[in-house]
Amino acid sequence: MANTINWGQAAVDNTIDYGQGATDNTISWGKSQTLSPSGETNITGSGGTPSFTNTLSTLFDGVDDKTTITQVSRNGVFSFSFWFKFTGSFNTNTESFVWGCHNNNSSYLGMSTASIVRLKLNGALFTIVESGGNNIPQNTWAQFTLVRNASNSVQLYLNGATFGSAIASGNSLTFSSFGRIINNSFGFKGNIDSAALWFSDETSNVATIYNSGLPSDLSALASAPRNWWRMGDGSTFSTINDNIGSLPMTMLNMSATNFVTDVPT
């Protein structure tokens, strides 16, 4: 019986091109690769780069939770940023210590009220007062960036905008702990995420680091930080990895449950 619809017909007189050979295939279905516009199939796995994800932060109880590293000292320009979610209470008589030195109180950053931060650099204590309404929130994610430039002007930024006026200080930054200094009873209660340290002035990148309220891949910046602690992602209890440098944090008085999925969104 004659095949009148051409399905399965030989390539010589197949007029609808299904399965037709490369010689006279006008719609390219089934054509050999040399003429096929579909190109090659990627079998190497290099066809795309996974997007950056941030899924974990470290939770501090405000009592005795803290992380420690080998002390870092910097007498020169620096930038220091971190994300935080403060769930404790402000205390006008002392501070909730976010970071400092775990074996002394020579340097620290503490929050007294929503508009007052105490900053201590190598023994010199400064009070930074925000009068423009860019106050520290409670129970909400926020970000601090602290920058000292070559003129020894130190400026604190909250969520990409200035917090208080700049102070003048040539004192060294020393840092070795998040959550608590020595055995002070006013530790930080809440979450810390994506902390980074530069030995450079990143004033021009403050908005980029804040990234409209989302932690980003800081290693991809043109000026990448010296140290970057993601505070959970890529780490296993009881060590928080330094994703760029070689200063891992040790978690003290904590457990694996201190890695939590509460992150800036």
Image: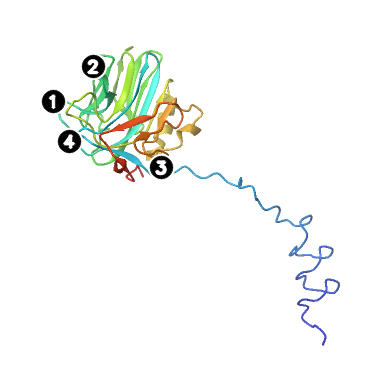
Q: If you read the primary sequence from the N terminus, does the residue marked by circle 3 or circle 4 appear first?
A: 3
Residue at the extreme left: 93
Q: Which mark is residue 89?
A: 4
Q: If you read the primary sequence from the N terminus, does the residue marked by circle 3 or circle 2 appear first?
A: 3
Measure the C-alpha gap from mark 4 to mark 1. Answer: 12 Å
Q: Residue at x 42, y 20 (%)?
A: 199
Asked if 66 appears above or below 128 in the picture, the reply is below
Q: If you read the primary sequence from the N terminus, does the residue marked by circle 2 or circle 4 appear first?
A: 4
**Amino acid under disc 1:** Asn
Horizontal and vertical percent position of residue 264? 35, 42
Q: Secondary structure at mark 1?
A: loop
Q: If you read the primary sequence from the N terminus, does the residue marked by circle 1 or circle 3 appear first?
A: 3
Measure the C-alpha gap from mark 3 to mark 2. Answer: 34 Å
Say which residue label 3 marks: 54
**Amino acid under disc 2:** Leu
Q: Secondary structure at mark 3?
A: loop
Say which residue label 2 marks: 125
